[in-house]
Image (cartoon, rainbow, N blue to C red):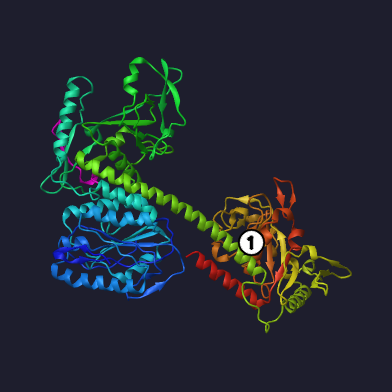
């Protein structure tokens, strides 16, 4: 394994990684313990992983079945170089870590270590994350080695990965300076405004993110000056701003631009607070709350009107606009990746308007509405104009527009750019003027842009691969789920047990139980049937009723084990009936289960409407939904055949009924498990022919109650039903990760 240079010549190591499942959604923050240490900056070293397990704090490897990858990034460099850990601590820790990793590499040959010389924070970060993007890691875990993080708490993060796209830990005790505390609080506020979640320690390097978070992280490091090292020979940004002010004064004198009455200078005072001084009035105010993050020494903050001239495009008014037709850009032409010229329109411009609205190469275009804040750089020499759905910024003194395109992209992603308006959001000029922008030297802007172009190309490529993989995984999961269900209903998922009561004996007990309930007046006689399905010596299937016997071989979709039986659905149910057309009410007392309540994801009462309480007496007792009732959507294309199981714990109200578009199926639950029937009716065997089984026009299909009652169902012994359900749930859990 290679080593990277650390403090006092000590090597820095890295952490092993392995395969792990992938998921993600919003942002979340689990907790972590830590000890207090000296204030320090972070440098990141990277280790990719695509091995067969995940590193555990107890020194073992946990095996995994999944095929996603995890990258673990460990901060070992800066802690030793900058003194957060002393030389003695480094000498004690680093060799032990390196030796442990070597041992794991001997045992697990797919464990890889990468390292690099100390080239600063950004360069080291870029090494690890560049590798992650190129290798297609699904997750990235970042941590320190300075004792503030506990390895065993990684699993708390890992178990939360499905709930969030980004997990951020926190240290219970901090010893930071005032400026860093302020930055942390600003970041916490920004994250709260975006995700409605309080982050206790926004500067912590202890984080777990999915691959989609890489781009934002890289942009953040770049715009904060952490992606490339600063060059002490660069012209300070303060000198650059002085040249800009001199150029603006010249342009004002030449009457090419108007004097900016709100011209200001932003500076940091000895108390580490930021102040803005307005040159026209001499007014000075503290703007600490407006500073989104810390920037390197030599950089400056400035308003957009200080570093460039902004202007909205021409208003479209077909009735008033006069002149010649010219091509123009609007918001539909501007994308983060560049200009789309496939849909170019024209408008009329007077001769005296041409210079005002003509685009110059290097102009930054920003969407005022729609996906407000979206922007790109006009990088062509051809003649083109723009309308008032776009802001145009033309920078002074050779400032790099592409750098500020990246700034806008970061600001938009983190919610620093906020749209105005109730229904349609707009990014107004006043909103843009209120934002502060970092100003590095021209040379550093060039270096940042060069690196960003390189790495973001890989991120984009990675995103496409991940999207394709996610789609493939989804398709595979769907097909696998269908295959599992098909195997289950054909008796191939779990083994049969010859000692168990056969399905034919089970059906005989059901018939006796239904006769008993009918005699007691607890079951309608219409639920009684005398149908027996059997297989003859010629391997044909026959159905025998009272005085008739007919060959139904053509109806049998597949073969089943000898201990199973085919049966009509009505023979194993005590109640099958469409719901009732309700009289709705705004009184939320008795919900009505409609088609929209029955989703493939499960039953939800949240979408239900309510019946008039006075009409409840018109509902027979049998119409009140019971736990385990199957609710089968029986009308309409798109929803026809969708099924859910009623569960009273998901209904906060006293009771519920079904409407006329839903068929309620109530099985003899002592003998037939509703969950088994659910799996059968959601299988491809049933769902693939559901429209063929229905009646009505192509636009309005109906699954008749008589059709539902006569559906053929393969019935296993009761204990085997239970084993099938358990096996399906087990496999489903594995597929979910």
Residue identified by numbered label 1:
682
Left/right placement of residue 572 relative to residue 415 reads right
The image quadrant where one finds the N terminus is: bottom left
The answer to whether any part of residue 284 appears in the image is yes
Left/right placement of residue 588 relative to residue 439 reads right
Above or below 598: residue 12: below
Residue 152: quarter of image: bottom left
Q: In what element is the residue under mark 1?
A: loop
Above or below 234: residue 525: below
Question: Which residue is drawn at the image coordinates 35% and 74% (left, top)?
Answer: 107
Left/right placement of residue 357 relative to residue 236 reads right
Q: Which residues are magenta?
A: 277-291
Residue 66, image x and y in percent? 46, 66
Query: Is residue 50 located in the magenta-colored stretch of the structure?
Result: no
Residue 492, image x and y in percent? 64, 72
Q: Nearer the viewer, residue 617 or 324?
A: 324
Question: Which residue is drawn at the image coordinates 23% and 23% (left, top)?
Answer: 257
**Looking at this rendering, what residue extends furthest in the right direction?**
547
The answer to whether any part of residue 601 appears in the image is no
Q: Nearer the viewer, residue 376 or 702?
A: 376
Residue 41, image x and y in percent? 20, 57
Above or below 330: residue 478: below
Residue 149: quarter of image: bottom left
Query: Is residue 284 located in the magenta-colored stretch of the structure?
Result: yes
Residue 53: quarter of image: bottom left
Residue 237, image x and y in percent? 16, 39
């Amino acid at each position: 394994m290679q080593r990277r240079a650390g403090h006092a010549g000590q090597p820095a190591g890295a952490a092993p990684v392995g395969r792990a499942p992938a998921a993600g959604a919003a942002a979340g923050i689990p907790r972590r313990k830590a000890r207090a240490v000296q204030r320090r900056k972070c440098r990141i070293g990277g280790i990719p992983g695509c091995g067969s397990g995940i590193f555990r704090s107890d020194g073992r490897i946990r095996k995994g079945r999944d095929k996603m990858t995890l990258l673990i990034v460990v901060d070992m460099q800066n802690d030793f170089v900058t003194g957060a850990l002393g030389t003695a601590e480094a000498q004690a820790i680093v060799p032990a870590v390196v030796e442990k990793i070597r041992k794991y590499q001997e045992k697990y040959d797919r464990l890889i270590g990468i390292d690099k010389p100390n080239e600063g924070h950004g360069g080291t970060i870029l090494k690890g994350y560049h590798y992650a993007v190129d290798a297609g890691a699904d997750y990235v875990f970042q941590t320190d080695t300075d004792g503030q993080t506990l390895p065993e708490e990684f699993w708390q993060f890992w178990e939360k990965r499905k709930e969030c796209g980004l997990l951020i830990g926190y240290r219970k005790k901090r010893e930071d300076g005032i400026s860093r505390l302020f930055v942390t609080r600003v970041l916490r506020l920004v994250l709260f405004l975006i995700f409605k979640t309080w982050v206790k320690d926004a500067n912590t390097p202890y984080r777990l993110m999915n691959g989609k978070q890489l781009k934002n992280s890289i942009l953040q490091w770049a715009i904060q000056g952490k992606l490339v090292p600063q060059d002490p020979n660069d012209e300070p940004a303060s000198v650059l701003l002085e040249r800009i002010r001199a150029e603006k004064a010249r342009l004002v004198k030449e009457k090419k631009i108007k004097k900016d009455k709100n011209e200001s200078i932003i500076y940091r005072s000895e108390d580490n607070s930021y102040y803005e001084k307005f040159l026209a009035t001499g007014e000075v105010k503290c703007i600490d709350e407006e500073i989104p993050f810390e920037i390197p020494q030599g950089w400056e903050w400035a308003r957009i009107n200080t570093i460039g001239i902004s202007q909205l495009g021409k208003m479209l008014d077909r009735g008033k606009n006069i002149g010649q037709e010219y091509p123009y850009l609007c918001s539909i032409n501007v994308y983060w990746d560049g200009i789309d010229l496939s849909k170019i329109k024209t408008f009329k411009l007077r001769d005296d308007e041409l210079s005002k609205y003509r685009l110059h190469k290097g102009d930054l275009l920003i969407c005022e509405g729609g996906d407000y804040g979206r922007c790109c750089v006009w990088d062509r020499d051809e003649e083109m104009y723009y309308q008032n759905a776009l802001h145009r910024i033309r920078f002074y003194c050779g400032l790099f527009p592409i750098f500020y395109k990246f700034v806008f992209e970061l600001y938009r992603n983190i919610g620093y750019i906020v749209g105005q308006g109730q229904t349609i959001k707009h990014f107004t000029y006043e909103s843009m003027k209120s934002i502060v922008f970092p100003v590095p030297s021209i040379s550093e802007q060039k270096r940042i842009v060069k690196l960003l172009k390189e790495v973001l190309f890989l991120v984009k490529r990675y995103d496409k691969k991940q999207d394709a993989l996610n789609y493939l995984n989804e398709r595979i999961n769907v097909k696998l789920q269908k295959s599992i269900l098909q195997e289950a209903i054909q008796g191939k998922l779990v083994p049969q047990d010859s000692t168990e009561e056969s399905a034919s004996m089970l059906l005989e007990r059901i018939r006796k139980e239904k006769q008993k309930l009918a005699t007691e007046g607890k079951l309608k006689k219409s639920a009684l049937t005398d149908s027996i399905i059997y297989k003859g010596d010629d391997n044909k299937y026959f159905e025998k009723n009272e005085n008739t016997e007919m060959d139904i071989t053509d109806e049998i979709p597949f073969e089943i084990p000898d201990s199973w039986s085919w049966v009509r659905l009505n023979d194993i149910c005590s109640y099958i009936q469409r719901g009732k057309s309700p009289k709705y009410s705004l009184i939320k007392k008795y919900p009505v289960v409609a088609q929209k309540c029955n989703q493939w994801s499960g039953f939800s009462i949240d979408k239900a409407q309510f019946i008039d309480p006075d009409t409840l007496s018109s509902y027979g007792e049998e119409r009140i939904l019971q736990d385990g009732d199957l609710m089968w959507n029986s009308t309409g294309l798109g929803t026809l055949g969708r099924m859910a199981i009623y569960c009273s714990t998901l209904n906060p109200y006293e009771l519920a009924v079904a409407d006329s578009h839903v068929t309620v199926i109530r099985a003899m639950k002592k003998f037939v498990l509703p969950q088994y029937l659910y799996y059968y009716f959601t299988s491809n065997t049933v769902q693939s022919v559901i429209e063929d089984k229905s009646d009505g026009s192509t636009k309005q299909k109906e699954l008749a109650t008589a059709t539902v009652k006569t559906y053929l169902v393969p019935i296993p012994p009761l204990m085997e039903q239970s084993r099938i359900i358990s096996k399906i749930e087990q496999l489903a859990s594995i597929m979910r990760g």
